[in-house]
Amino acid sequence: MTEEVAAIALVGLFLMVIIAILGARLTSIERRVVKLSSVDAKLDLLLQQAGIKYDPYKGAPAGVMEAIREGRKIEAIKCYREATGAGLKESKDFVEALQRRAGVS
């Protein structure tokens, strides 16, 4: 029985270490996102002051733009994949970037 308790304690310790590592990694990623958001906002301000109109939908396939405007994120990802042949992650990242730049959640 003590061997079982020791094994359970070891597994518990292992899980706690993994959770701590993942938590630290997540915090690091969150910091990077905050920094990138700040840079993104500064770029938007510079474009605005330079009189340059930024169109976040420029170059995006028509079905993607329509789906984003209607709040259908999954449909937008599917449309982008079909139109470009991109992978799922790349398509999701593209659609989410379009949403952020266009101010759509």
Image (cartoon, helix red, strand yellow):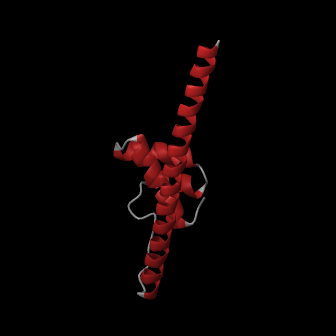
Answer above or below: position of 35 versus 73.
below
Query: In the displayed image of the protein, which residue is found farthest to the top?
Result: 1
Q: Position of residue 68 (x, y in %)?
A: 55, 55
Answer above or below: position of 51 versus 17.
below
Answer above or below: position of 35 versus 90.
below
Left or right of 4? Residue 34 is left
Q: Nearer the viewer, residue 69 or 13?
A: 13
Q: Tell me which residue sits at (57%, 58%) in the image.
A: 69
Number of numbered discs on residues: 0
**Residue 70 appears in the picture as rendered:** yes
Q: Tell me which residue sits at (55%, 27%) in the image.
A: 10
The quadrant of the image that shows the C terminus is bottom right
Q: Tell me which residue sits at (47%, 48%) in the image.
A: 92
Q: Position of residue 65 (x, y in %)?
A: 50, 57
Q: Position of residue 60 (x, y in %)?
A: 41, 57
Q: Nearer the viewer, residue 79 or 38?
A: 38
Query: In the displayed image of the protein, which residue is found farthest to the left?
Result: 85
The quadrant of the image that shows the N terminus is top right
**Residue 80 appears in the picture as rendered:** no
Answer above or below: position of 94 versus 102.
above
